Image (cartoon, grey):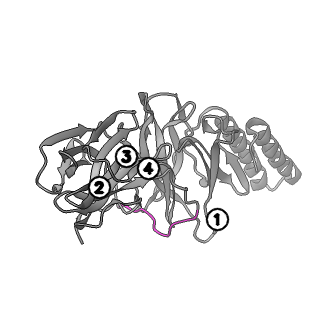
Amino acid sequence: MGSTHDQDLSSIKGELWGGQGGRDWHYRPVNGIVEITIVYTDVIDSLHFKHAIGYGTNKSTENFGGHGGKKRTTILFDWPNEYLTEISGSTGTFNRDEVIGTLSFTTNRNNKYGPFGSVNDGKPFEFISKKNGAIVGFFGRQGNFIDALGVYYKGPPSPIVAKVNSALTMDKDDIPLDVGPWGGNKGKSWNGGRFQGRIIEIDVHVRNGVIRAIQYRYEIGSPLVVSSIKHGGEVADRASTTYRIILDKDNNSPEELVGISGFYGAFDANCCEYQVVQSISFYTNKGKYGPFGTEIGTFFNSPVCTNAKVVGFHGRSGEYLDAIGVHVQYLSSSTPEQPIIDGTEIVVCAKFASINAICFGLNYLNKYLHACVLGCLLCYFCVRQSFGNVH
């Protein structure tokens, strides 16, 4: 086995181009590639890479290939805003061996580099990632030259709605009640509120490989279920796909949302200041849902502990979901937080709470039973009229 660097096992291995000589090598960085150095004369002699390992910190690899070559070119990428999307070239015969003769690179900003090398008497090759996909690593065979070359790439992936049986946990006693938001600064700010009920469903709308919108439903008193408004752009088109997460309603051990993670980055290569949520995953006390969208850009995650849960969302949105954050509630708190609710949702909860209070008083006095039943029916009617999304 040849050289191996890092292990991003979520990437997909592509086709291998070139000859059979040399030994295997693999380069699968967890974070983005920030630099490629190509050493060449007639053919590609060697490749050298750097990738990000933290904010402002990069890691270099060894040289893959030989030690010859009279020309050297270094390409710098503005990761995470810029990343590789295309590679092309041709194989060639040199000293009777089939090797990589020419090589070119293209990024999501349509910056083109190359061709490097000049021997192109072999087979041409090309890889173009799907929209919002990226080339995230390389593999091949190496000796005195780059004998063969292939790429590792990423999606847009097919979102996993089925639960992955591994919950994200992190024991922490100092989680703030409001975390985030993460993402861009465009769009309109929104706050969906912090509720005493349980989030039971989440709809994730994906378009062009990024998060178009989210909408969620919560229980505010069984069997009453209320939907939030949709945060993001319109989704009534064929280019959008909606994925619904349904949390386990087991009365003995209900499934609770405990955290989120994802990526945000530039949506449009020609307008790199326009940052949106590229990908999102949801963690519960029983497992994980996602990822939804494309895992490219800057990673984010909310801290998670075993005695807290997510009880709401906030963020920014316009045509897409620009940013997202969470509201957290401690499960061990003896004094519940007063709901912080926006817009029509506060009207619904106010009417619901007021009529329930009347019903409680009437029941306590054991009088006017029929009036209480009527009040509860009026409560349900008020909720339907004020919110329009009760199931």
Instruction: Tell me the element at label 4.
Output: loop
Q: Residues within 10 Å of mark 1 (few under 14, many from 20)?
A: few
Q: Mark 4 to mark 2: distance in Å?
A: 14 Å
Whether the residues at callouts 4 and 2 have beta carbons within 8 Å, the answer is no
Q: Is residue 17 above or below residue 52?
A: below
**Contact (Cβ within 8 Å) of mark 2 with mark 3:** no
Kindly identify which residue carries mark 2.
29
Magenta includes 128? Answer: no
Q: Where's residue 287, x and y in %?
A: 50, 65
Q: Quadrant of the N terminus?
A: bottom left
* Tag of residue 295: 4
The amino acid on which the numbered mark 3 sits, given as a three-letter code, is Ile
Circle 2 residues within 10 Å: few <14, some 14–19, many ≥20: many
**Distance (Cα) linking label 4 and label 3:** 20 Å
- The amino acid type, in three-letter code, at marker 2 is Pro
Q: Which residue is mark 3?
A: 87
Q: Secondary structure at mark 2?
A: loop
